[in-house]
Amino acid sequence: MRKIKSINSVVLFTAFVCTLLECKAQNIDSLFKIYNSIENNDTIRVKAIDEIAWSYRYTNPDSAILLANQQLQLATKLSKTYKTLNLGKEQEYNAFKTLGVANKSAGNYQKSLEYYFHCLYLSEELNDTTEIGNSNISIGIIYYNLSNFPKSLEYYLKAMKLFESINDKESLGMCYNNIGLIYVNQKNYSKAIEYYSKALKLSIEIKDKETIGYCYTYIGSAYYYKMDLIRAFEYYTKSLQIKEETNDIRGIGISYTNLALVMQDLGNHTKALDYYKKSLQIKYQIEDKLGMGICYSNIGSLYNTINNYKLAITYCDSAIKISKEIGDIDSERLAYQHLATSYSRLGKYKEAYEYHIKFKELTDSIFNADNSEQMGDMKTQFEVEKKEAEIKAEQNKKDAIALVETKRKNSILLSVSLLGIFIFIFSIYIFRSLRITRKQKLIIEQKEKETQKQNETISYQKHLVEEKHKEITDSINYAERIQRSFLASTDLLDDNLNEYFILFKPKDVVSGDFYWASKLINGDFAIVTADSTGHGVPGAIMSLLNITSLEKAIETNTNPVEILNHTRNTIINRLKKDGSPEGGKDGMDCSLIVFDRAQKRLHIAAANNPVWVVKNPGNTALEVLEIKPDKMPVGKHDRDKESFNLKTIDVNEGDTIYTLTDGYPDQFGGESGKKFMSKRLRELIVSNSQLPINEQKEILETTFKNWVGNLEQVDDVTIIGIKI
């Protein structure tokens, strides 16, 4: 049997699974050759297809399912041929395990549950305690994803008992984590932290770095639900650091979602949206439908917070669609809650009420009293199981005596009971009719009170949101005026340039992009096109630091390389004080051009952003030069001790220089929703480079607007064109 632990998680943590088999393309080809060769015996062939199917379980679940079914047929044949050996059953187990994981990856939870039960039956036949425990955990996880928490806890407790008996610390920690998740969903956060801490202690003992990272995630989530946001952020950050060290792509996506939730609750909506979109990109990359549904719902909630209700509805609708597809009841109910908020704030109270009812119905189905009582009973049963075993024999004896006595009494009471039952049933019918009428009246009265209270709450919350929105808008507009005062003025540019255009489109009111210019101490004219780290308010603050660092650098330097080197040192030294262990890693990508009019030359230094020069050779074809940048930013970097490189070119009248940031080529849009890309932008610029400079700008603006369409602008955009 495959002795790989099925380390699973649930909800936000489905990434915690058995380690992916590293299998290069040539190895897969070799295994296919072994499987397809009729000269090899079935024992060798079934092992080959086992490795192939297992390697595809996450990256290509459909192929894994197809191959595992072929493996299952071959394994069944081996079971019949070698009845005295376990080889066939072991391969059947492996095939069912691959089918279980692959169907779970594809969101087919009911199918996955069916295959995991096959694994449980086979592991019991093979008397393999470890795999019996793993199968119980896998079944518990599927029940969790289906929001059947009592069943989930039942199988987790079975697994925990088995792993305790063989002192398997790694698997026992896995049980603790999964039980903790159930307590989180039952809002018993202190109990959840207790189980998570047990798992963390075991993971540290066995030095399992990957599991330590997930324990940090779980503990952070429990603190998040307790609204201890500072401790939640602390544990989420620890988890992200470990996942990046172990290159856990799924785990990184989960960490981005968790950090986004904290940022949203702390009011940093720009950072929260950035984290959500990073997480969603990873979910699409790994085809994690459960994670995609959660991301859609969370982004919908965020757009409600920032009053963009139309986008909130769009994302919540997507969340409901995918949650229904995979049977994720919890994500579906939360999306209904966010939709109720959106429609309420739009004044569409009928729709808001309908979605609130759907949210309430699904919430009641998950968090009802019967579930909580049933799980409590199972926990008690587990704790007293040994005691029950000791008194079982005595109880059996008492039960036998009681059974004889019961039969005697039943024969006496039967005739009397028949008449009593008839009278009782008739009485119940009358009583039930009266009770239903009374209950319906109470429900109607209660709904009316709830609706009135909700309307009052919505009205008050609307007033608070409007006040906060006005304060925030006024502050951002004031920040925009301050930032513009740092940009190159029209008077300065007109005095030093003949023909030029500046296409400057911030994503938000304030921008991380900026353009800056100045006369140098030797009389030359310098102009910078830059993209600071971040956008919105954080990007704008960073741009001011970058501009003041440039202004300090030109006090003593005229060479573009020395200006960028000096600017980089200033930025690094200032950000050392940001409180992080290694100092801030922020800065900017930029291109710096110095016009030497006496020599008719351009001196260029560039960090990550290129410079394009369209030469004007007269009647011959246009010549396009690309001044490639140094692949490092102006800021802290593993190459920040290296000097930037100087490029010098001769220019003539009619030549046109273009500088830009990455916002235009990175914009998603068009019919396929893809990036515009640098190649397409370059072709657009060159094809229109002979037009008047203002017409070039209009073409760029129109093309960008049409490309974006109904999508959002994803980054700040800056393009500068200068004709010599």
Image (cartoon, rainbow, N blue to C red):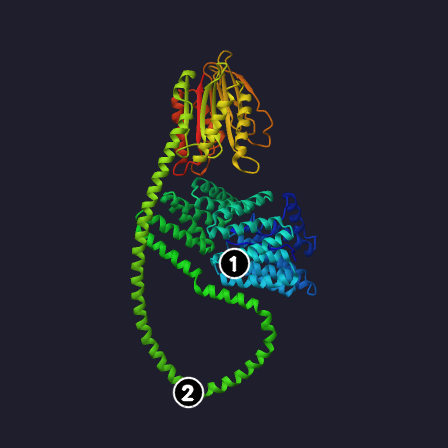
309 sits to left or right of 251: left
Label 2: which residue? 415
Quadrant where the N terminus is found in the figure = bottom right
Residue at position x 66%, y 46% from top? 30
Disc 1: which residue: 191
Whole-percent x, y for residue 105 in the image: 53, 52
- Residue at 50 percent across and 51 percent down: it is 221
Q: How far is mark 1 from mark 2, CA to CA?
A: 53 Å
Q: Nearer the viewer, residue 442 or 719?
A: 442
Which tag, 1 or 2, sits closer to the chain's start? 1
Quadrant of the rendered image containing residue 72:
bottom right
Q: Where's residue 517, x and y in %?
A: 45, 21
The location of residue 684, given as percent across then percent down, is: 45, 27
Camera-side residue: 146 or 76? 146
- Kindly tell me whether residue 77 is visible in this rendering: no
Q: Which circle marks residue 408 in the picture? A: none
Q: Secondary structure at mark 1?
A: helix
Frontmost residue, 198 versus 39? 198
Q: Amino acid at mark 1?
A: Lys
- Where's residue 375, x and y in %? 50, 64
Asked if residue 170 lies left or right of residue 724, the reply is right
Q: Quadrant of residue 68?
A: bottom right
Q: Secondary structure under badge 2? A: helix
